[in-house]
Every structure is written in structure tokens, then in C-alpha cells.
Image (tube, helix red, strand yellow):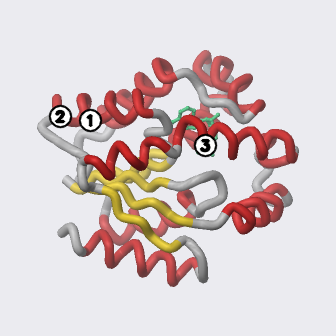
């Protein structure tokens, strides 16, 4: 299986690029943010729990997120591999993912980290706020908190995969097509 972590701060282009890559490589796209949003929309118990954290730009607790992710992976027994988008976002999530995949005889193939300067991220999020309809895109203070949470809790996850020699840094600036091509060359190098 080809199991990829697509990594990067809010606004780096993880969702957009995941959508392009899954078709090319026949992978299942698992975006924890999308799954939480679907649960909020469907007014499920999980959605009710996640909503207050998301609205503030904070992380949903690890225990809840890890359990949900496992269920999503198990719901796709036919998958040839996954793109994890927005997960893992903490070191405990990364450790849990490794253990869980190992229990299936699988492992993460690589982390692809989209590198985008902070100024550009803020500009992209400002533009996205106009079209995404996401409440957590609408307020500058919430965006600021998401960036702070990223730096504090999520950025260290890069080091976790670097230690395993699985980190590949990808320039996330330029046209969407150019970025897709860079990601594909990195992935093709793994095949
Ligand atoms: P995203 O769509 O990836 O930007 O995620 C939107 C929000 O969902 C985040 O700001 C968090 O509140 C929550 N979320 C998504 N993925 C995770 C995760 N792996 N761990 C904790 N919270 C998450």
C-alpha cells in the first residue's frame, strides 16, 4: 500500500492537492477536518463534541480524533492506500497511527510537507474566507489561533517523520499544477 501524509500549515493547499493526487494514484483521501465538518452538518454526537474545538481553532482531543481515524481506515478494506490530510496533527496522533498501521502490517510510506511562507498563508486564508463558508476561516483571531496551534502542536510532527527518514519537503508556492507535479515526482520516487 501507498500511505501518504500530506502535511502543512492551514492554507498550504493540502485539501486541493489531495483531491488531485487520489485520482492519479487510486488512493482514499482521509481529511479529518472534512470528516468532522460532515459530522457537524449531520448533527452527530461526534459533530457536537468537535464543534466547540473547531469553532475556536483548537484541536479536537487526540483520543476522539484517533478513534475516528481508525474507524475511517477500517471502513475502506479495499483501499490500495490512503492520503492522510490534516492527520496526524500531534505527536501522540503520529505514534498512534504508526501502531495502528503496524497492526495491519502496514506503514506510512512518506510525509510530503508543503512549504509555504507565513505571509502567503495569511493571504490565502483571507481569500479562502470569502468562499469556503467555514466559520473557522471567517475571523482573523481564529485564523491566528490555528496558526499558533499549528506551530505549537503540529509542526513537531515533521521531526517525527524526519527521524524515520520519511520526510520530503515540497515547495508549495507557484501554480496548483506546478505543485501537483512536484508532489507526483516525489511520490513516483517512492514507487
Ligand atoms: P482542517 O480542515 O484540516 O483545517 O481542520 C479543521 C479543524 O478540524 C481544525 O482546526 C481542528 O479543530 C479540527 N481537526 C482536524 N483534524 C484534526 C486532527 N488531526 N486533530 C485534532 N483536530 C483536528
Q: Which numbered disc flags the more N-terminal residue, 3 or 2? A: 2
Mark 2 neighbour density, 10 Å: few (under 14) some (14–19) many (20 or more):
few
Q: For mark 3, give the secondary structure.
A: helix
Is residue 62 shown above or below 11? Answer: above
Horizontal side of residue 150 vs 124, given as left or right: left
The residue furthest left is: 105
Give the label on residue 98, or none. Answer: 1
Marks 3 and 2, how far apart in space? 26 Å
Say which residue appears at 32% left-offset and 34% top-offset: 97
The residue carrying mark 2 is 102
Q: Which quarter holds ligand 1? A: top right
Mark 3 neighbour density, 10 Å: few (under 14) some (14–19) many (20 or more):
many
Tell me where residue 26 sits by quadrant: bottom left
Horizontal side of residue 139 vs 159, given as left or right: right
Marks 1 and 3, how far apart in space? 21 Å
The residue carrying mark 3 is 150
Q: Which numbered disc flags the more N-terminal residue, 1 or 3? A: 1
Asked if labels 1 and 2 touch by Cβ distance under 8 angstroms, the answer is yes
Q: Along the line of sight, which residue is nearer the eye, 135 or 77?
A: 135
Tell me where residue 169 sits by quadrant: bottom left
Number of residue marks: 3
Say which residue appears at 61% left-offset and 16% top-offset: 45
Amino acid at each position: 500500500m501507498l500511505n501518504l501524509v500530506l502535511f502543512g500549515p492551514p492554507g498550504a493547499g493540502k485539501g486541493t492537492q489531495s483531491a488531485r493526487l487520489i485520482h492519479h494514484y487510486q488512493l482514499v483521501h482521509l481529511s479529518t477536518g472534512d470528516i468532522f465538518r460532515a459530522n457537524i452538518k449531520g448533527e452527530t454526537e461526534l459533530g457536537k463534541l468537535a464543534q466547540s474545538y473547531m469553532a475556536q481553532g483548537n484541536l479536537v482531543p487526540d483520543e476522539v480524533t484517533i478513534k475516528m481515524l481508525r474507524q475511517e481506515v477500517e471502513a475502506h478494506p479495499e483501499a490500495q492506500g490512503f492520503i492522510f490530510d490534516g492527520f496526524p496533527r500531534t505527536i501522540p496522533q503520529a505514534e498512534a497511527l504508526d501502531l495502528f498501521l503496524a497492526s495491519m502490517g502496514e506503514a506510512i510510506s512518506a510525509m510530503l510537507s508543503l512549504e509555504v511562507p507565513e505571509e502567503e498563508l495569511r493571504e490565502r486564508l483571507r481569500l479562502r474566507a470569502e468562499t469556503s463558508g467555514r466559520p473557522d476561516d471567517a475571523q482573523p483571531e481564529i485564523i491566528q489561533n490555528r496558526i499558533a496551534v499549528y506551530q505549537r502542536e503540529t509542526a513537531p510532527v515533521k521531526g517525527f517523520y524526519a527521524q524515520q527518514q520519511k520526510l520530503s519537503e515540497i515547495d508549495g508556492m507557484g501554480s496548483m499544477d506546478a505543485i501537483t507535479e512536484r508532489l507526483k515526482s516525489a511520490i513516483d520516487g517512492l514507487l
